[in-house]
Image (tube, coloured by chain):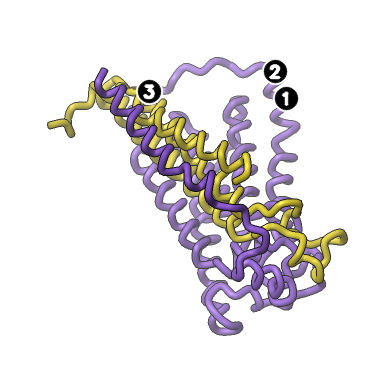
Amino acid sequence: MTLITILGFILIVIGIWGMLSQSNIIKIIIGFSIVDTGIHLVMVSIGYLKDRTAPILDETVGKAEALARVVDPVPSALVLTAIVIGLAVTALMLAYAVKLHEMKGSLDIHDLKELKW
Amino acid sequence: MIKKYAVLLLLGAFALMLLPFVTEVTPFEELSPVAQKYVKDGPDELGSANLVSSVIVTYRGLDTLGEVAVLFIAAAGVGFMLRRRGDAKKPVKREASGILRSGTVFLFPLVLLYGIYIFLHGHLTPGGGFQGGVVIASGIVLLLLAGVSAKISGTVLHWIESLSGAVYVALGVLGIVLAAGFLDNRILPAGEFGRLLSAGAIPLIYSLIGLKVGAELVGIIDAMQKDEL
């Protein structure tokens, strides 16, 4: 596949490493964000076709030749959706982090023992 | 120590799982059949020059409605969790520098205008409601950083958000009555291809989405900082 796909996969792996190995909640949220970005890159690169342009019609890309000259608009639309959802989920996670810090005075997951057995 | 190796092992297995994507999948040469339909019939059917917009607002309009709903629920969750108590003491803030303050006063109207431009031209240029809303919210962040009081009333914000959401759904239902189905943009005349007033209801829907997203993000930012906006 293209270089962008590979870079996206690398970002996903780095993000998962961050989520699994860090114990600070803010760093875990950053790891999630990196995974998110990697997935977006992979999705966009799947829709990309070589030597083609953005799916926006104007004087240079007319209606008639659009079929042969534009990339797939569906993955772009999906990624747009995914970015907004990612933003919303990140904001919600940060709100949880603020609340946890208010309650425990710490952001380290080793200090949160309620769900351990 | 053993946890560290377990993590590495898991990552290795995960990378191995992704490997076939890199080695065996060949890039597409042609558009997928669905995309072919969207690209071929989209411009004449819906009149939108930006094909991504026609996919987001009309062909997959229901997804976008769901997305707006998810954003709303997240904003509501943030607001619920970080709601202010009356007795919370005000944090001591350092005064912003003069450069930041005068720069903000100059830039804020331009940022606002640019956000509105982005969502109004969503059917012609790269952009749309979500991007425009985020730009507007970034202008508010600038105000916060500079410590310029904007006196944004929470009531006005809630009304903008609720009204634009309700009108969005109402436009969708109007599509069932006047056109082919839910969220069909052909309830308004298609207009001349490539002009601002074209593509039926797409600019209208994108403006509503832009207002809603902008208001929601400002609400999130407002909830995340302690003093009043």
Shown in purple, the chain is: B
Check whether the beta carbons of the residues at disc 1 and disc 2 lie within 8 A of each other: yes
Q: Nearer the viewer, mark 2 or mark 3?
A: 2
| Marked residue chain, label 3 | B
Q: Residue at x 69, y 68 (%)?
A: B39
Give the camera-side residue of B95 and B126.
B126
Location of residue B187 in the rendering, given as x and y in whole percent from the top left corner: 64, 78
Q: Which circle marks residue B98 in the picture?
A: 2
Residue under numbered circle 3: B89
In the image: residue B73, left or right of residue B174: left
- Residue matched to label 1: B102
Q: Residues within 10 Å of mark 2 (few under 14, many from 20)?
A: few
In this rendering, the answer to whether A26 lies above or below B169 is above
Side of B33 where B21 appears, left or right: left
For the point 65% across and 64% down, which residue is it?
Answer: B31
Visible residue check, residue B210: no
* SS for callout 1: helix
Real-space CA distance between mark 3 and mark 1, rounded to the nearest whole angstrom: 28 Å
Looking at the rendered structure, the kind of residue marked 2 is: Gly
Residue at 55% from the left image edge and 50% from the top image edge: A43
Whole-Å distance between the Cαs marked 2 and 3?
A: 26 Å
